[in-house]
Every structure is written in C-alpha cells, then in structure tokens.
Image (cartoon, helix red, strand yellow):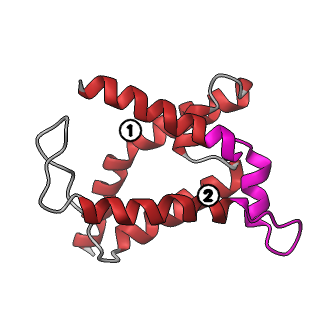
Amino acid sequence: MRLLIAIIAGGLFGIGLHLSGMTDTNRVQGFLDIFGAWDPTLAFVMGGAIFPMAIAWRLTIGRTPVAGSQFPPRPNPAITRRLVIGSVLFGIGWGLVGLCPGPAMASLGYGGVPGVVFFVAMLVGMASAPRVSLMLDTRAASA
C-alpha cells in the first residue's frame, strides 16, 4: 500500500513539474534573472506548493497516516552553519543548471546526455555530503 501511494504521489509530482514548466531549465533560470528577462512562473509554483503544505502540516497534528506509523517530524527551524552552507551550495547548483532534484528526476526521460550527467553528479554529491559534512564538523571542532 505504501509503495502504491508513493508511486501515485511521485507520478502526480512529476506531472505537476512538467505542466508548470519547472523541468524547463530556461524557465527556472529566467526566474533568477531579475535584471533581465525575469520569469515569475516559479514564484507562483512555489506559492502553490507552500500554502497547501502549510495547511497539510496543520492537519497532521494528532492524526496518523493511512499508510505508515507516523508523519515525519517537523523540520528544525534553527538557522545553522550547516543549513546556510547547504542552501548556498544547493542554490548555486540550481542556478547554474536550472534543475533541482525533483525536476532532474522528472526530466531524465528526455533530458539527453546533459540531464543524465547532471543526475549522476547530483547522486555523487548526495552520497558524498555526509562524509564532507563530517570532515567539516571535525575541522571546526579542532579549530
């Protein structure tokens, strides 16, 4: 049951990304080009995701999921060094390429070689992040 719900949710997410144009790297990079040909589409997509999710978080209080034992915990609101560094790296990669993990996966079928190269590089970055984080924490502790 969980797998079926995950497949349906992932499929709906992918369809939404395609319909909203978020798999088009030019559209995403156009949002970041505030002094040129600015494209506000991404702001509407983010707003269309943030507001329903805020309502969904409120509705989970005191409830249990249909498939699973519990809802994931709410994110930690603290702004830490790790959060800032990760956000900056994510933003640089997102701005240079025009894709983040969801749209990168959704565009694998038609992104050609550049899309696959980006996806593999993204996976390597995700796999190496815990080691790099540990290394940075160790260096910070010894300094």
Give neighbour class at mark 1: few <14, some 14-19, many 20+ (Cα, 10 Å).
Answer: few
Q: Quadrant of the C terminus?
A: bottom left
Return the residue nearer the eye: 52 or 92.
Answer: 52
Which residue is rendered at x = 71% and y = 29% of the image? 111
Residue found 88% across the figure and 70% down from its top: 36
Mark 1 or mark 2: whose residue is earlier in sequence: 2
- Is residue 28 positioned above or below 123 on the image? below
The amino acid pointed to by label 2 is Val
Measuring from the top left, give residue 67's x and y in whole percent: 19, 34
Element on which disc 1 rests: helix
Q: Taking 37 as reference, is 68 left or right?
A: left
- Which segment did they paint magenta? 17-41
Q: Give the residue displayed 38% in from the left and 66% down from the top.
A: 54
Up the image or down, 136 lies above or below 131; here it is below
- Asked whether residue 36 is drawn in magenta, I would say yes
Nearer-the-camera pick, 101 or 9: 9
Question: Which of pointers 1 and 2 indicates the residue nearer the eye?
Answer: 2
Q: Is residue 23 above or below residue 38?
A: above
Q: Measuring from the top left, give residue 59's x and y in whole percent.
A: 26, 61
Residue indicated by mark 1: 127
Which residue is denoted by mark 2 in the rendering?
45
In terms of depth relative to the viewer, which is nearer, 131 or 85?
85
